[in-house]
Image: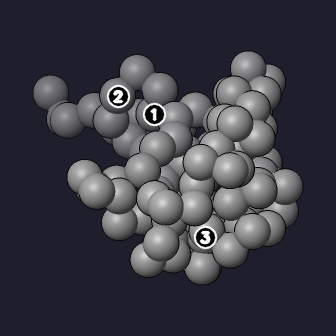
Amino acid sequence: MHWILRYAIAPDYLERRTAFRDAHLALAWASADAGALILGGALGDPPESALLLFASEAAARAFAGADPYVANGLVTHWEVLPWNTVVGREAANPVRPAA
């Protein structure tokens, strides 16, 4: 099982993120280097939300709890959702078609 951390972002996210971006990215890369965060990033151009893919629910929740974007109101709501990945090299539960 993988876990998605889904962020809703504030309307002024782009204007305010510069002050917190280095700290957010340091947290994200540390989590990735530890093997907890698999992928992450903003959705849309300009960003309308963000998704981060984690190896465990606990890691996703810990990340949100430590994220300066959350602490400083750039993220207005977050949730952790289970994602049963079935296709791809990194799928948690690979399912192949019947022969």
In this rendering, is residue 41 above or below 58?
above
Say which quarter of the image contains residue 46: bottom left
Q: Please tell me whether mark 2 sits on a helix, a strand or a loop.
A: loop
Residue 88 place in picture, x, y as percent = 35, 28
Residue 13 coordinates in the image, percent (x, y): 50, 65
Which element type, helix, strand or loop, lies under badge 3?
strand
The reply to whether callout 1 and callout 2 are in contact (CB within 8 Å) is yes
Numbered mark located on residue 88 in the image:
2
Disc 1 from disc 2: Cα separation:
5 Å
Q: Is 99 drawn above or below residue 68 in the view shown?
A: above
Q: Quadrant of the C terminus?
A: top left
Which label number is shown at residue 16?
none
Mark 2: few/some/many CA within 10 Å (<14, 14-19, 20+):
few
Q: Nearer the viewer, mark 3 or mark 2?
A: 3
Residue placed under numbered mark 3 in the picture: 75
Relative to the observer, which residue lies in front, 58 or 16? Answer: 16
In this rendering, position of residue 93 left or right of residue 19: left
How far, Cα to Cα, is label 1 from label 3? 28 Å
Q: Mark 2: which amino acid?
A: Gly
How dense is the environment of label 3, judged by Cα within 10 Å: few (below 14), some, or many (20 and up)?
many
Res 91 label: 1
**Looking at the image, which is closer to me, 19 or 62?**
19
Lower sequence index among marks 3 and 2: 3
Residue 88 left/right relative to 31: left
**How far apart are the alpha carbons under marks 3 and 2?**
30 Å
Which residue is at a point 45% across and 33% down the rendered structure image?
91
SS category of the residue bearing label 1? loop
Residue 16: x, y in percent?
57, 61
Q: Mark 1 or 3, which is nearer the eye?
A: 3
Q: Amino acid at mark 1?
A: Ala
Q: Nearer the viewer, residue 64 or 71?
A: 71
Q: Amino acid at mark 3?
A: Val
